[in-house]
Amino acid sequence: MKDNISRRELMRMAAMVSLYSAFSADDALAGHHEETISHGTHFGPVNATVKNGKLVSTTPHPAISMDTDMMRSLADYVNSPNRIKTPCVRKSFLEGRRQNELRGVEDFVSVSWQTALDLAAEKLLEAKQKWGNESIFRTSFAGWSQAGAINRPNTLQGRFLGLFGGFTDTISDYSAGASSQLMPYILGSAEIYSKQTSYEMIAANTKTIVLWGMDPLKSFLIDVGVPDFSRIKWFQRFKRLGIKFICIDPVYNDTAKELGAEWIPVRPGTDTAMILGMCHYLYTTGKYSKSFIDKYTVGFSMFLDYLLGKEDGIPKNLAWAEKICGVSVKRLVELTETLRSDKTLIGSLYGPQRIEHGEQYHWSLVTLASMLGNIGKPGSGINFGGGLLGVAGKLPRRLSQGRNPARTIIPASRMGEMLMNPGRTIDFNGTKITYPDVKLIYNMGANSMTHHQDINTLIAGLRKVDTMITHEIVWTPWAKFSDIVFPSTTSFERNDIGFSFVSNVTYLWALRQVVKPMYESKDDYWILAQIAKRLGFEKKFTMGKSVMEWVKWSYEGTGNNLPFDKFWKVGHIKLTQKPEDKKYVRFEDFIKNPNTNPLFTPSGKIEIHCEKISSYGYSDCLGHPTWYEPQEWLGGKMAKKHRFHLISIHPKYRLHSQMDNLPLGKKYKVNGREPVVINPADAKMLGISDGDNVEVYNDRGAIICGAVLSKRVMRNVVRVDEGAWYAPEKPGVPGTRCISGNPNVLTSDKPTSRLAQACSAHSCLVSLRKLTEKVKDNTAYDNPVVVNSKL
Ligand SMILES: Nc1nc2c(c(=O)[nH]1)N[C@H]1C(S)=C(S)[C@@H](COP(=O)(O)OP(=O)(O)OC[C@H]3O[C@@H](n4cnc5c(=O)[nH]c(N)nc54)[C@H](O)[C@@H]3O)O[C@H]1N2
Ligand SMILES: Nc1nc2c(c(=O)[nH]1)N[C@H]1C(S)=C(S)[C@@H](COP(=O)(O)OP(=O)(O)OC[C@H]3O[C@@H](n4cnc5c(=O)[nH]c(N)nc54)[C@H](O)[C@@H]3O)O[C@H]1N2
Ligand SMILES: [Mo]
């Protein structure tokens, strides 16, 4: 790392920085004229128009021919009435009484930066000295936050807390928590971050694409970096090329609708049984590829004992599968025959693995694909995650998080369980983890009050925590539950560098400051540096660099010939795709020669039976793909009590909770609440009409949603998208209903298994009831009362 720069260079950079800020925001901010400045976000690159110092609109960047509602909502996002204006401290906390039960209930006091920073430093020091660094927990796993390489809140936070002596960290995520732990044993990599078969090869070779729990035209509207939307355009092109689509999903999702896919509705959480039935069919009809299994896989015979029922007397045949997954034997045969073609590609994202025993979905799908023998061929096989498609050139450097001396780590989705059970030891992927006793939670760039499962348990767990420090842009439910709240800038109020890296053509984007920081907000970098100063390690944290100096350092890591100042002026660079990436076929090397190009699995081959996993002795994750009956599913006992299966999938018009509070909500909210999508036949039975207020409830809680009737969800399945800001009907009362419609009040925080300990949000049964009585208006977007203080 080139962190020590010469004094001369520093001076040169200082001169340059002032030049750039003059270019970007200053003129417009002075209020003299209108200006357009390009910028980049998770929602896309945009041209931002600034008038009289105010961001008035954002339009799609001309380099990218794509227009989305979210891109057009960014001025609303920056100017939101929910912006946190000043540093705030919860009243009782400020007065030294804590009274955790008043979180989310009582007023905040607006304090000076000095007071808030001093208080945060004091509480951090107290936690460290009294209970040790592992009592400090950071919530922001991968953390969505924003798209820049430097101002990434979770990296900054890890860097800060690491230098402070460490913290309890998280491993894995809510996204692909089950598959990312399992897949390295089976295919040698987690797959989500691996380069996948190029879209060019798919276009040239594929006739049918199976969207197995995958909604790319929605999910690729955003990106972990700055999207260039090439993946969306490829899917649209596939349709024009005449490629057929099959959607295997409890929901006829947006992609299926737009691409005119054939729909195979599957009961939620039962894909594994469906796939095992198809494997059984292939084996018993002799239609499987024995040569592929012999040459490229290990452990097939042990799996076969299970598949044929030699162990438990139950052959996992198509009739068995039909009973579980609800897809007819006839349809399953047709589907398997379609899959046998080397012109059929199976694509899957993460929805189907966010269930109890979610690991089994990916494992059984890899087994099916192996039996089909099409892995490694250009037009077929499997494509998990929609693909990283090759990186054109070197990426910008990212700020390093550094080391975490405390070394305590929990799987991300175990947060609530950890808070409720300090000292409990759990199994995790061949290791043991003991939960620490968390006293301080530091949150930046995540909104756990919407993203975590079983919110009522989470709230109970939070009551045991002494201090909650949060950096936020807006008054999210989590911010409202915090003790010390720092107002953060949005990316529009600071400089950064971003890139489109999950794409065919990679761009570098100058994320230029567009407006001055709103109200008293500050950059996360500055806030942490100020606390570090109080704790004696500011220099180690900043290495003497300003944000702009880090941005330049980041750019220089790309090795691009264009000087930084030119790049900053132009605003973006388009990089040329490497010709070999256009021809890339996932696993082609391995298939050509498995001995010289082995997979990174224990055996070097595809592990249909995995000795290593088997050696852990987990009854909930054996050595081969297995169907486990979930606790919550439509075929189980619990479905007699709660007859509907809730799936809480990702929203089209938000990035999780981001933008939930904006006028964009008018497009889809019903009575100001999150919609619950119900099949018309079910709604009729329940006496529910479009637009009714509906209570969705189970033994974990209740939420109120607005009804939308649609045949695009299966019978007995209801859909409530995740991300609505939590709003308690009676603040402070345990178990009170959420009047905003946040489905995580209802979901279970049960782990997938002892292997991955991942999120199983989609295994969730509920009941529905039409509400005839008047219901309180949604309060999710009301700001808390903030009283002024002289402090
Ligand atoms: N617009 C938008 N895009 C996003 C996000 C967002 O919030 N908004 N979030 C981003 C994030 S964090 C992630 S992790 C990614 C990927 O996120 P994913 O988890 O892949 O996205 P989902 O749409 O929730 O799920 C994909 C599909 O799986 C289906 N599904 C759910 N349960 C089952 C099941 O049991 N069986 C089958 N066969 N299908 C099932 C859903 O109905 C949906 O159509 O998306 C990213 N993209
Ligand atoms: N039921 C159910 N639950 C789920 C899922 C599901 O499918 N179903 N999906 C899960 C998945 S895959 C994921 S990835 C998680 C997502 O969970 P999160 O990553 O927590 O989701 P976001 O709502 O994007 O939260 C990001 C927060 O960061 C804030 N922020 C943005 N930029 C900045 C910044 O520069 N500085 C600071 N300080 N803050 C910033 C935003 O205002 C927002 O509150 O949710 C999970 N939860
Ligand atoms: Mo995710």
Image (tube, rainbow, N blue to C red):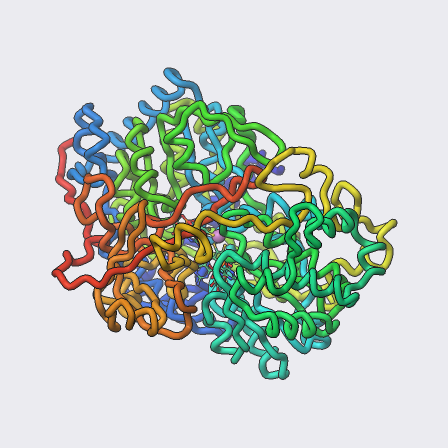
Residue projecting furthest to the top: 130
Q: Quadrant of the N terminus?
A: top right
Q: In which quarter of the image is the C terminus?
A: top left
x 16%, y 38%: residue = 106
x 19%, y 53%: residue = 779
Q: Which quadrant holds residue 685?
A: bottom left
- Choose between 786 and 459: the one closer to the eye: 459
Q: Which quadrant holds residue 135?
A: top left
**Residue 89: percent from the left, percent from the top?**
22, 34
**Residue 297: percent from the left, percent from the top?**
79, 52
Vertical position of residue 311 compared to residue 560: above or below:
above
x 48%, y 41%: residue = 751
- Choose between 99 and 226: the one closer to the eye: 99
**Residue 61: percent from the left, percent from the top?**
46, 70
Residue projecting furthest to the front: 313
- Choose between 242 and 554: the one closer to the eye: 242
